[in-house]
Amino acid sequence: MPTLLLLFLLLFLLVLATTSSQLLPISSKLDHLPITDRPFGTRLFLTSHPNFLNLAWTCCVKAEKSQFLSTTGINIFYDDETPEKVTRVANNPDEITARFKEIIEGEDCSTFVQLNTTLELKLNKTLLYRVSCEERQSVDLEVNYQYWDEDHDHPWSLLSVGSLGLYNTTKITLGTIKTISDNMKNALWTIPGGIVADRTALDHNNATKADLESWRNWLSWITLAENVTCCIPVAAAPSPMDLYPYNSTNQFQSNFRHFMELPFASSHEVLWYSFNHRNLHVVAICSSCDLSENSTQFKWLEEDLKEASASNDTHWTMLLGHDEIYDEASPQKPVTTARLQLDKLLDRYNVDFAVWSHERWYERTKPIRNFKVSDQRVSNSLHHVDGTIHYTCGTGGIPLQTYNMEKYKHAARFYASEYGVCSFHKVAKDVFDTMFLYTNTSSGLVTEYDFLQVSKKLYAPAVDLNNHFSKFMKMFGVVIVGGAALIMVVMVVLKVVQLHNPSIIVNKIRNIRWSKAAAGSNINMSCEQLEVDAEFPDSRDTVMLLEEEPVPDADLVTSAALYGITM
C-alpha cells in the first residue's frame, strides 16, 4: 500500500512538473530571447496588390547610420535551380525604407532599425530571399505564398489564432502553423489580438522600466515567430495590451504599430483596416477602441462593409477582432449600445465569419443574429447560412481556460484542451471548409477537429440604377451630338457640290450604270435606264438603250420613233 501511494505521488509530481513547464513563460526561462547581430524578426505583410508582399526585418545598429545602411540589404532569388538574383541596398530609400528607434542607454543594443522592402511574386516561380545586417546575412528563406492568377485561382487557407504570448505552448502553435503552411504553400495568418500579452502595460509605477520591458517582449516575440512570419503573410487586430504604451493621445505610437503595421493602412487606420484576400474581404477592428455609433472607427467600418457588399471583387466577408461581442451571458460583457450597433452591421452587410480570441479556448457558434441563434441546423455542411458564424480562436499559447457548455447555449462546437489554429480553407469561390487544427503530441501529426463546410449562392451585387442611368444618358448624349455633327458635314458637302454643278446629284441618283455579259458572247453591253413620260404597251414599262448613240438635237418623240414606238 505505501508503495502504491508513493507511485501515485511520483506520478502526480511528474504531471505537475510537465504542466508547469508547459505554462512557464519563455521570458522567465530564457530572460528574453537573445538579441544578436544577425537579422531577426523577419515578417511578411500583404500589400494593396495581390502579387506583391512587404517584407520587414529588424537589426541592432552598432555602426554609424550611413555606414550601416550601405552594408545592409537583401538578395532576392526566383527558383533555386536557376537563380534569378536581385540585390538591394538599404542606402537606397526607393528600394528599402528604414525606421530607427532609440532606447535606453546601457543595454547591449541601444539603437534598432526596422527595414522594409517589397517582394514581387511571379507565376510558376518560387520566391526566396536572404536579408542582412551590416553584411551579416540570414539563411535563405522560402516564401510559401503563390502568385495569384485570377483565371486559375488555386486553393488557399487563412489560419487564425490569437492569445499567443511568450510561452512554451506558443511554440507548439507556431509549429502547427509552420507545418500547415509548408504543406499548403499558399497560406495567410491572421491574429485576432493577444500577440505579446504584454502585462507590463499595467505597471504605471515605473513608466520607463515598463516601456523598456514592453520593447523587449516585442523583440522576443518577433524572434520567436520568425520561422512562420518569414514565409507567410501575417495581419493582426490589436488587443488592449498589444497597444502599450497606450492612452488617448499616443495610441498610434504603440509597439503594435511599429511591428505589425500593414503598408497599405493609412495613418488614421493603423488600428482598424481592411483588405481583400482573393475573394475574401477581411476587416480588422480595434474592439477595445471606441465603437459607438458616432465614432471614427464605426463610421469607417460601416462605409467599408457597405462598399464590400456592393462589390463583385469579393464574395465572402470576415470580421477580425479581439473581444467577442456575442457573449450575452457574460457579466464582463453587457450588451452595450456599441455591441448592439456592431451586431446590426454584421447583419445588414451579411458578414459570414467573425473571429475573436479573448477567451482562451476554441469555439464555433451556431449562426447568430441580434445576439440570438438564427439557424438551428446541426450539420457539418451548411448552405446559405442565416446569420454570422462566430469563432473564438484563443488557443495560441496563453494557458487555456475551462469551458462551461451550460453557460454558452449558442455554441455548436468547442474544444479547450489543445493549442491550435482555426483554419478557413477556400475550396471554390462559393465554398469554404472551416476546422480547428492542432498538433497531436503523441503522433506529432496535425489533427483536425470540428470540420464544417459552408457554401452559398453567389449573387451579383445590387445595381445602382441612378449610376447606370447617368452613364446611359452620357453615352446617349455623345451619340446624338456625334450624329448631328455627321449630318451637318454631309449637308455641307452636298451643298458645295450642288453649287459647283447643280445637275450632278440628280444624274448620279437617276443613272444606274451596270455591265452584263451577253448570252453566248464575251461582249459587254453598257445599258442605261431612261425614264420616259409616255404611255407604253403593257409588256414594256421601260426602254433599254443598247450601245446608244447620242442624238444631239432629237426630242423625246423623235427618240421614241427611232425604236418603233408611237407617241
Image: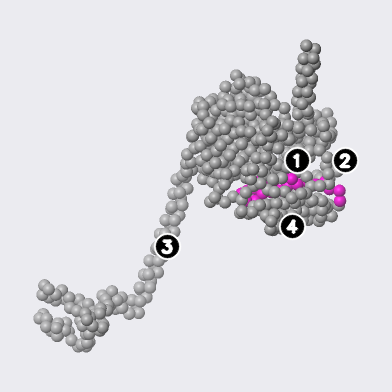
Q: CA distance from mark 1 to mark 3?
A: 63 Å
Q: What residue appears at the point 80 percent right and 29 percent down from the top-left corner?
A: 203
Q: Mark 4, residues whose alpha carbon is within 10 Å: few (<14), some, or many (≥20)? A: few
In the rendered structure, the answer to whether residue 431 lies left or right of residue 537 reads right
Q: Mark 1, residues whose alpha carbon is within 10 Å: few (<14), some, or many (≥20)? A: many
Q: To which residue does mark 4 refer?
A: 87
Furthest residue in direction top, as rendered: 1
- The mark lying in front, picked from 3 and 2, is 2
Q: CA distance from mark 2 to mark 1?
A: 19 Å
Q: What residue appears at the point 66 percent right and 33 percent down from the top-left corner?
A: 438
Q: To which residue does mark 2 refer?
A: 107
Residue 45 included in the magenta stretch of the image? yes
Give amino acid for label 2: Glu
Q: Which mark is residue 482?
A: 3
Going from N to C along the chain, the mark reached first, 1 or 3, is 1
Q: Circles 1 and 3: CB distance less than 8 Å?
A: no
